[in-house]
């Protein structure tokens, strides 16, 4: 009797596996296609962004709805920026990658445009101007070898753009880090990062105006 019951169970299991073999592969492909990202419209990233003399156009999107990358070309057709989303294990893990500076940052104070209060720090040949706006921290970095302007002038340019359009309002915390030197081998990428729950968004680009505008246009 037990042998017959075991035989029935095995037959039922085999039949179920046969059904999955017949239908499951198509179902899995459909699920993967539904979760996959192949167009910018499936993401939070903007299709285009224009700021000052910089015009960025999205060229491709790849990944899944939880983790994707959108690449942008400039007017010359070169890759000039990326927009990424990553889903991490927790909100704490996402926040730890934002590099947010709190309002208690120490240093001499300076007043920027629009009445913004900032703090100045200097180290290793660079001057850092920090300030906060809402849930965001902003750091404008100027090389001491840069003769194009003062650290405060550069910080004012950044602050002026930030005043024109808000950064993503859904951000729990966010950080803008931009550099006055946009060209040369020593140039570093400008970044805007923000966290919403366990999701981390990051924009990286070659120009301050273009990078900030991509983040602003994503809201």
Image (spheres, rainbow, N blue to C red):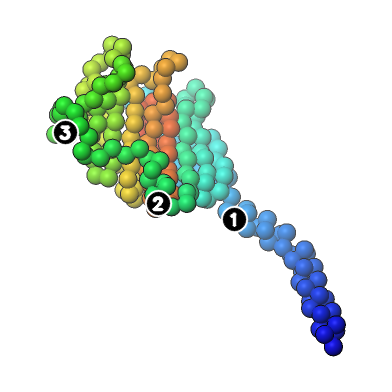
Q: Earlier in the sequence, mark 2 or mark 3?
A: 2
Q: Identify the image quadrant of residue 188.
A: top left
Q: Are marks 2 and 1 in contact (CB under 8 Å)?
A: no
Q: Identify the image quadrant of residue 61.
A: top right
Disc 2 from disc 1: Cα separation? 25 Å
Badge 1: residue crowd in 10 Å (few <14, some 14–19, many ≥20): few
Q: Secondary structure at mark 3?
A: strand
> Residue beneath label 1, please?
34
Relative placement, left or right, of 203 versus 22 is left
> Residue beneath label 3, please?
117
Q: Position of residue 91 (x, y in %)?
A: 40, 51
Q: Residue at x 16, y 26 (%)?
A: 108
Residue 91's label in the rendered image is 2
Q: Position of residue 206 (x, y in %)?
A: 42, 25
Q: Position of residue 52 (x, y in %)?
A: 34, 26
Q: Earlier in the sequence, mark 2 or mark 1?
A: 1
């Amino acid at each position: 009797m037990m042998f017959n019951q075991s035989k029935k169970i095995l037959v039922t299991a085999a039949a179920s596996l046969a059904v999955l073999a017949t239908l499951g592969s198509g179902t899995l492909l459909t699920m993967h296609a539904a979760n996959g990202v192949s167009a910018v419209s499936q993401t939070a990233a903007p299709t285009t962004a224009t700021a000052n003399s910089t015009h960025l156009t999205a060229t491709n999107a790849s990944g899944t709805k939880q983790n994707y990358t959108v690449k942008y070309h400039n007017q010359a057709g070169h890759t000039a920026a990326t927009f990424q989303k990553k889903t991490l294990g927790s909100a704490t893990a996402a926040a730890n990658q934002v590099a947010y500076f709190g309002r208690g940052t120490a240093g001499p104070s300076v007043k920027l445009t629009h009445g913004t209060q900032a703090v100045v720090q200097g180290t290793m040949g660079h001057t850092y101007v920090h300030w906060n706006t809402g849930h965001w921290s902003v750091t404008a970095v100027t090389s001491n070898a840069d003769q194009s302007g003062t650290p405060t002038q550069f910080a004012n340019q950044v602050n002026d753009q930030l005043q024109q359009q808000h950064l993503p309002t859904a951000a729990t915390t966010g950080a803008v880090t931009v550099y006055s030197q946009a060209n040369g081998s020593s140039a570093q990428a400008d970044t805007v990062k923000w966290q919403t729950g366990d999701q981390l968004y990051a924009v990286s680009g070659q120009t301050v105006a273009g990078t900030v505008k991509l983040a602003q246009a994503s809201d």
